[in-house]
Image (cartoon, rainbow, N blue to C red):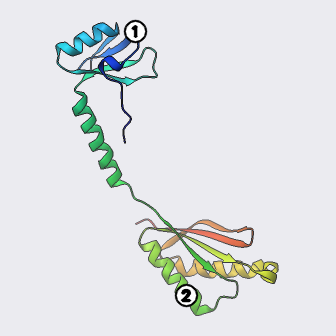
Amino acid sequence: MIKELLINEEIRAKDVRLIDAEGNQIGVVPISRALEMANEKKLDLVNISPNANPPVCKILDYGKYRYDSLKKEKESRKKQKIINVKEIRLTPSIDKHDIEVKAKHANNFLKAGDKVKVSVRFRGRELGHTDIGKVVLDKFKELTQEFGNVEKDSVMEGRNMTMFLSPKQD
């Protein structure tokens, strides 16, 4: 949503840097003169840069300006691609077929354009054998290399070893 700008009498500055309807810089003028010029053209005086010193005001049709900026914002939201992060959990003692099934799921996520977080959870005495978890993640990486790239390689975080995969670009 666009932020509301101050218009016409809402502007409290004494002097403003004025830009006319055609985009020409008029210079620093008193607010009363700027309001007169806007009224003569039957347009609004809009404070487009309130933080400047003096504030920058422009003479324009505020309704049309607001409509156009909302339309632009809506259009930019349409073009945004939302990327989700899907998580797949493995264990160090995972079987060959089970890892293939999980890799198939990860490939489907990657095809859909989502990122995948693969984590191997260590419980109890498994924590002493983190090298087995590294082997499992390497096998998983090998099974998903057709559809994904390793964004962040395997790292130990507490009791979990995680790796991030991102979809391959076309």
Q: Where's the N terminus, which quadrant?
A: top left
Q: Residue at x 70, y 72 (%)?
A: 160
Would residue 93 appear left or right of 38 to someone viewing this image?
right
Would residue 54 appear left or right of 64 to someone viewing this image?
right
The numbered disc on residue 100 is 2
Question: Which amino acid does the dot numbered 2 rest on?
Answer: Glu
Between circles 1 and 2, the one closer to the viewer is 1
Instruction: Please state which of residues 114 and 137 is positioned toward the viewer in this rendering.
Output: 114
The disc, 1 or 2, on the residue closer to the chain's N-terminal end is: 1
Q: Residues within 10 Å of mark 2 (few under 14, many from 20)?
A: some
* Quadrant position of residue 165: bottom right
Question: Which amino acid does the dot numbered 1 rest on?
Answer: Lys
Above or below: residue 71 compared with residue 138? above
Q: Position of residue 127 (x, y in %)?
A: 79, 78
Residue 22 appears in the picture as rendered: no
Q: Which residue is mark 1?
A: 14
Above or below: residue 79 compared with residue 6? below
Q: Residue at x 45, y 20 (%)?
A: 52
Q: Residues within 10 Å of mark 1 (few under 14, many from 20)?
A: few
Instruction: Please state which of residues 154 and 117 is positioned toward the viewer in this rendering.
Output: 117
Q: Position of residue 119 (x, y in %)?
A: 64, 74
* Secondary structure beneath label 2: helix
